[in-house]
């Protein structure tokens, strides 16, 4: 049964709900609306700091969800639906926006933040009317939001964890579902209950009435004064709309506003995240919070000798980035921070973070070459790259150099098994890992191929630290270390040369020089295993000239071309998780 007459107005239109939320589908279905469900692929990652208030963020996200579906459907069959509805529910407490928790710990920090307090639930809604003209999509967006205030009782730790363990919080904003078990946490609700559940049905109907009967009469016939905008309703009259400020602009110019430049704004903002990470690592915040009880901002500040206010801001930034969690008892490390950001974490990348913090990427040296098309990929467009960080670290303090080695070791450990098994290497009797650093990959190669003898060839100043790095599993006689410079000294004899994760930081000329040396040393039938290719689709990597030339990986196609030019045949690529990872070429007869 359709109680709201204005919902009836939509029955003859093709309506799409751009939402995967089962609650939204249920609410609208119960209201008698007929619609298709096409979940939006829009990533809910708009930079929150750019919005004047939490509801403005929810409304923009709802709008982007709906527009993404409208565009996708229009692109697919050049016919957009008549109406696309998008929604986004968020919880706001003390100026902070809470969305769906990423894991149990996140759910815990959200719920403990809400315990004993009042918070607001905002649902932003966008109603997008679409019209295809000459293959072009025109959209009219109407948007609104609804606020409901919810007060939680004081929640005990036991209750919190029991609730989290029920699994209910995970797909819900703020980490609770008021309509189910989460109802037990709620003391008071001011406003529309369904708004908390995910869709403000009452306001939605009012908005539709505003759009379809703007004069206030529930009369389906269109008013004369509203002609001239949008599509036609089922009676054949011009569809009428209440114009918001944005729509007023679009009706003046005849154009819809351009899509929200999400990616661009994220880029503008993204340095802040790196900066927060660099600062926290430098100050050893994660070392301080490792294993111990949670600490308040003022205690962390005291131990660091920093200001309480600045420290609080830094710690909150780390919470937002997922490196720290915050409860009433204070801040503590997340698992990611313990693993990767403490000095002695099992997979510590702190050295790498400090290296990048101290060596900002200098793209300004020859900016005109960086994005220029048609530059020979082998002429070293920027020429400013300094080589792999562990080799460029000679001038660094001992602590930084060791930190970097640890980081290289961790990175190699994370990928070694994928690399070693990307191809069947059992036909090779010996291998030489050029720039193999601590031997992390060499030991895994040896374990996978018990017949293989592996020589790690690296600078003496790198190899002098190797003893401090234990291989995973027992040491083996199969692996040996040989000091040398692969640009100066002759390369050790081997059936297979491995060049793993060292090329990305070298300029093109150096890459060419090194691979030419390998090609000369490699016997016919021998192999070159190259691990450094861009982790993205070929075309994408090819298009990203800037990234390729100025510090990123090169694409598999670029490397394959180079290997063939250098006399390698049967060049094959292998990947992990659908992404290219490594190339194997076989040396042909000279
Ligand atoms: C506070 C509260 C929220 N929710 C659900 O939380 C999700 C919010 O996330 P979203 O990003 O707005 O939506 P989604 O689920 O990701 O779907 P989509 O629209 O495809 O982005 C929606 O599901 C809501 O029902 C409840 O079910 N009960 C509650 O008490």
Image (spheres, rainbow, N blue to C red):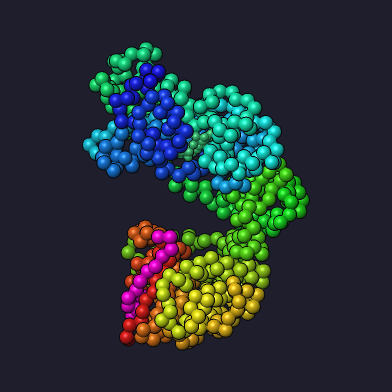
Quadrant location, the N terminus:
top left
Locate residue 316: give its quadrant: top right
The residue lying toward the viewer, choosing from 158 and 112, is: 158
Locate residue 227: give its quadrant: top left
What residue sits 53% from the left and 74% below the top?
444
What residue sits 37% from the left and 36% below the top?
37
Q: Is residue 92 visible?
A: no
The residue lying toward the viewer, choosing from 137 and 66, is: 66
In the rendered image, residue 96, in percent from the top left (x then y), is placed at: 60, 38
Q: Is residue 293 visible?
A: yes
What is the magenta range?
A: 563-578
Q: Is residue 395 magenta?
A: no
In the rendered image, residue 482, in percent from the top left (x then y), is placed at: 55, 84
Q: Is residue 577 magenta?
A: yes
Left or right, 530 with respect to 82, comes to right
Quadrant location, the C terminus:
bottom left
What residue sits 67% from the left and 56% below the top?
286
């Amino acid at each position: 049964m359709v109680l709201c007459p204005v919902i009836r107005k939509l029955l003859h239109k093709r309506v799409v709900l751009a939402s995967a939320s089962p609650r939204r589908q249920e609410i609208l279905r119960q209201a008698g609306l007929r619609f298709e469900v096409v979940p939006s692929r829009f990533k809910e990652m708009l930079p929150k700091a750019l919005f004047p208030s939490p509801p403005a963020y929810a409304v923009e996200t709802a709008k982007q969800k709906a527009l993404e579906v409208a565009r996708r459907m229009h692109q697919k069959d050049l016919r957009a639906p008549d109406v696309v509805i998008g929604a986004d529910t968020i919880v706001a407490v003390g100026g902070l926006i809470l969305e769906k928790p990423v894991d149990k710990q996140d759910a815990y920090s959200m719920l403990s933040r809400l315990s004993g307090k009042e918070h607001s639930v905002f649902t932003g809604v966008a109603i997008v009317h679409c019209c295809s003209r000459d293959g072009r999509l025109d959209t009219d967006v109407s948007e609104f939001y609804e606020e409901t205030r919810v007060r939680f009782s004081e929640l005990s730790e036991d209750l919190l964890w029991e609730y989290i363990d029920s699994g209910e919080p995970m797909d819900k904003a703020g980490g609770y579902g008021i309509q189910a078990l989460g109802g037990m946490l709620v003391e008071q609700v001011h406003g529309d209950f369904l708004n908390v559940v995910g869709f403000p049905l009452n306001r939605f109907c009012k908005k539709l009435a505003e759009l379809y009967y703007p004069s206030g009469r529930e009369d389906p016939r269109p008013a004369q004064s509203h002609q001239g905008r949008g599509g036609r309703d089922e009676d054949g009259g011009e569809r009428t709309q209440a114009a918001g400020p944005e729509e007023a602009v679009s009706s003046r110019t005849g154009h819809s506003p351009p899509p929200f430049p999400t990616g661009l704004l994220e880029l503008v903002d993204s340095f802040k995240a790196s900066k927060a990470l660099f600062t926290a690592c430098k100050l050893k915040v994660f070392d301080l919070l490792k294993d111990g009880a949670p600490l308040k901002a003022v205690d962390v500040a005291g131990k660091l000798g920093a200001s309480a206010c600045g420290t609080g801001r830094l710690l909150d930034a780390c919470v937002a980035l997922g490196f720290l969690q915050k409860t009433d008892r204070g801040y503590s490390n997340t698992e990611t921070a313990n693993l990767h950001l403490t000095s002695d974490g099992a997979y510590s990348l702190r050295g790498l973070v400090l290296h990048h913090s101290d060596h900002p990427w200098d793209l300004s040296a020859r900016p005109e070459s960086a994005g220029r098309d048609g530059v020979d990929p082998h002429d070293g467009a920027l020429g400013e790259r300094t080589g792999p960080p562990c080799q460029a670290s000679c001038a660094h303090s001992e602590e930084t150099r060791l930190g970097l080695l640890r980081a290289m070791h961790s990175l190699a450990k994370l990928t070694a098994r994928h690399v070693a098994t990307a191809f069947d290497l059992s036909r090779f009797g010996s291998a030489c890992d050029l720039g193999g650093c601590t031997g992390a990959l060499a030991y895994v190669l040896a374990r996978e191929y018990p017949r293989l003898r592996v020589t790690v060839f690296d600078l003496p100043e790198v190899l002098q630290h190797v003893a401090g790095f234990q291989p995973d599993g027992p040491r083996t006689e199969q692996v040996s270390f040989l000091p040398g410079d692969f640009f100066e000294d002759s390369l050790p004899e081997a059936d297979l040369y491995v060049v793993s994760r060292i090329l990305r930081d070298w300029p093109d000329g150096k890459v060419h020089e090194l691979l030419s040396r390998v090609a000369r040393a490699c016997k016919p039938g021998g192999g070159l295993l190259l691990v450094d290719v861009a982790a993205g689709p070929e075309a994408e990597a090819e298009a990203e000239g800037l990234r390729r030339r100025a510090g990123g990986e090169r694409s598999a196609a670029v490397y394959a071309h180079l290997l063939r030019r250098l006399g390698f045949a049967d060049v094959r690529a292998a990947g992990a998780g659908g992404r290219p990872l490594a190339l194997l070429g076989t040396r042909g007869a000279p």
